[in-house]
Structure formats: structure tokens, C-alpha cells
């Protein structure tokens, strides 16, 4: 019996993409923040970007090799800003603030149309709702859910930055299911990538996996071994509601 629907955040509930404008805005803000804390990079914006990009690339290689998410302190002290040799005791207290800024500035983000209506429909069916998200910030997802005015729909928000586990590891889906008091076979997952969302939820034994494509889907799914395919593909996030409703009604008629 279907009891629970879980969602990815960036690319699924919200549109998300990166361009040169957002990349430079994040670097400018980072430079401003560091100088405000007395941590002067003493390099040009172009050099700051080059070094931060190189640090993120190193972190990405580590992270993607083991599907482990480090805390913002480790990400920024040991990878993204490691080349500057800032005193750790001075940089560490600011790392979550940097991580939050990076998530909302480096990426363009906007709630998809009709998300609230879709969530309301599922909630009215008595289904439990949750989020499972890969993120390098501890609090940003919670804050942006509040900004979108949809936080109250979710009984649980499971983040890679909190658990240390990243999709597609099935373990992060198991954590979310336990926190929602649901069995995997009762759960439906909605995400924008095969590489993280579909493969991860199917490995965890979820009942159905639904894909909605985003501006980053092609990049994230490039060259992957497609161990699983989505059970359903949609183009409008609102379609989750009638699709889940039809699946629930089909169960009841059996």
C-alpha cells in the first residue's frame, strides 16, 4: 500500500541551473564575505574563481568516488578554500554561512509552477511527504522551503550534509523511510536524475520512481550505466498528484 511520497529538491521541486552570471555573483559574494571577516584572499576575482573551482573539482572527485558528503567546514577548509591557507580556527565558524550563500547564489533557483497545489493534493489523500536531497549546506534546504511556503507539507527532510550519505546510496533513502516510519515498498520517489534519484530509490526497493527532467538532468546523467529506468516520466510537477492518485486507486481496486 502506498503511504509515502518523497521528493528531490533542486531540479525537481525547484528549477535550478548555473550560468556565468551566477558563477561570478557567487565568487564576488565570497570575496566580500571573506574580506569582511578579515580573511583577504589577496588575489583577483579571476584567480579566486580559478582556485575555488579547482578546490570544488577535487572535492567532487572525492565525493563522487564514495557517495559521501562532508560537512561545510571540511568542504570549504579542506577543499574549496584550501589553497589559501586561511587559519582554520578563523575560517571554520563561517563555513555554513558560505555554504548557504553558495547554494542560493551559485545556482539560479525557482519553485516550479503548481508545486503547492500538487503537494496539497497528495496531503489531502493522507500521504506522508518527505524530501531526500544532496546538498553541501546544512540549513539551506530548510530555509528555502520556508521561503517557498511549503515547509509544513513535509514530515521529514533528509539531507546528505546531515547524514553524510549521498544519493544514489540506498542508505540515505532508508534513513528517510525510517524517519517517516514507512517501508520502502510503500514509497514513491520523484527526482530529476536517473544517476542519483531513480537508481538510488530503486536500489532501496521503493515501489515507484518518477522522473521529471531539469536543466541539469543531461549533465548529471551523462555517461552513466543505467542500472534502472524510471517507472514514469512527467513534464509537469503537478502531474505527480494525478499519477499517484491513479496508483492508489488501482491498489484499492485489487
Image (cartoon, grey):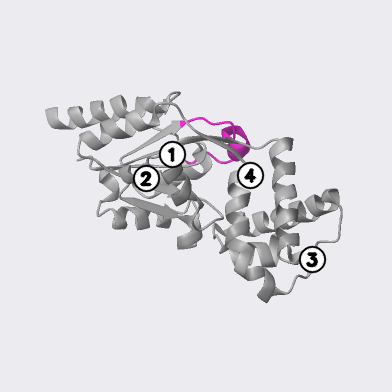
Q: Quadrant of residue 18?
A: top right
- The mark that comes first in sequence, 2 or 4, is 4
Q: Is residue 154 magenta?
A: no
Residue position marked by numbered label 3 in the rendering: 84
114 shown above or below 134: above
Number of numbered markers: 4
- Specify start and end residues of the magenta stretch as a single range: 212-228
From the viewer's perspective, tell me whether residue 135 is left or right of residue 239: right
- The mark that comes first in sequence, 3 or 4, is 3
18 shown above or below 52: above
Q: Is mark 1 on a helix, strand or loop?
A: loop
Q: Position of residue 94 (x, y in %)?
A: 62, 65
Nearest to the observer: residue 166 or residue 114: 114
Residue position marked by numbered label 2 in the rendering: 151
Residue position marked by numbered label 4 in the rendering: 105
Few, some or many residues within 10 Å of mark 2 (<14, 14–19, 20+): some
Residue position marked by numbered label 1 in the rendering: 148
Label 2 close to label 1 by CB (< 8 Å): yes
Q: Position of residue 142 (x, y in %)?
A: 44, 51
- The mark that comes first in sequence, 2 or 3, is 3
Amino acid at each position: 500500500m502506498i503511504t509515502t511520497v518523497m521528493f528531490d529538491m533542486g531540479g525537481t521541486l525547484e528549477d535550478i541551473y548555473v550560468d556565468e552570471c551566477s558563477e561570478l555573483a557567487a565568487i564576488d559574494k565570497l570575496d566580500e564575505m571573506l574580506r569582511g571577516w578579515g580573511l583577504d584572499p589577496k588575489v583577483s576575482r579571476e584567480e579566486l574563481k580559478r582556485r575555488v573551482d579547482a578546490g570544488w573539482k577535487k572535492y567532487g572527485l572525492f565525493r563522487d568516488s564514495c557517495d559521501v558528503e562532508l560537512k561545510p567546514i571540511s568542504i570549504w577548509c579542506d577543499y574549496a578554500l584550501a589553497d589559501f591557507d586561511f587559519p582554520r580556527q578563523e575560517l571554520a565558524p563561517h563555513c555554513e554561512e558560505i555554504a548557504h550563500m553558495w547554494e542560493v547564489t551559485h545556482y539560479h533557483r525557482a519553485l516550479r509552477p503548481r508545486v503547492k497545489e500538487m503537494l496539497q493534493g497528495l496531503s489531502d489523500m493522507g500521504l506522508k511527504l518527505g524530501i531526500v536531497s544532496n546538498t553541501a549546506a546544512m540549513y539551506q534546504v530548510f530555509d528555502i522551503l520556508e521561503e517557498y511556503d511549503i515547509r509544513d507539507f513535509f514530515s521529514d527532510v533528509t539531507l546528505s550534509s546531515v547524514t553524510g550519505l549521498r544519493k544514489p546510496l540506498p542508505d540515505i533513502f532508508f534513513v528517510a523511510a525510517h524517519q517517516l516510519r514507512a517501508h520502502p515498498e510503500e514509497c514513491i520517489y520523484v527526482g530529476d536524475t536517473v544517476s542519483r534519484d531513480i537508481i538510488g530509490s530503486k536500489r532501496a526497493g521503493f515501489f515507484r520512481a518518477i522522473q521529471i527532467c531539469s536543466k541539469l538532468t543531461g549533465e548529471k546523467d551523462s555517461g552513466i550505466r543505467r542500472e534502472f529506468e524510471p517507472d514514469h516520466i512527467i513534464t509537469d510537477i503537478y502531474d505527480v498528484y494525478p499519477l499517484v492518485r491513479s496508483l492508489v486507486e488501482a491498489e484499492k481496486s485489487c
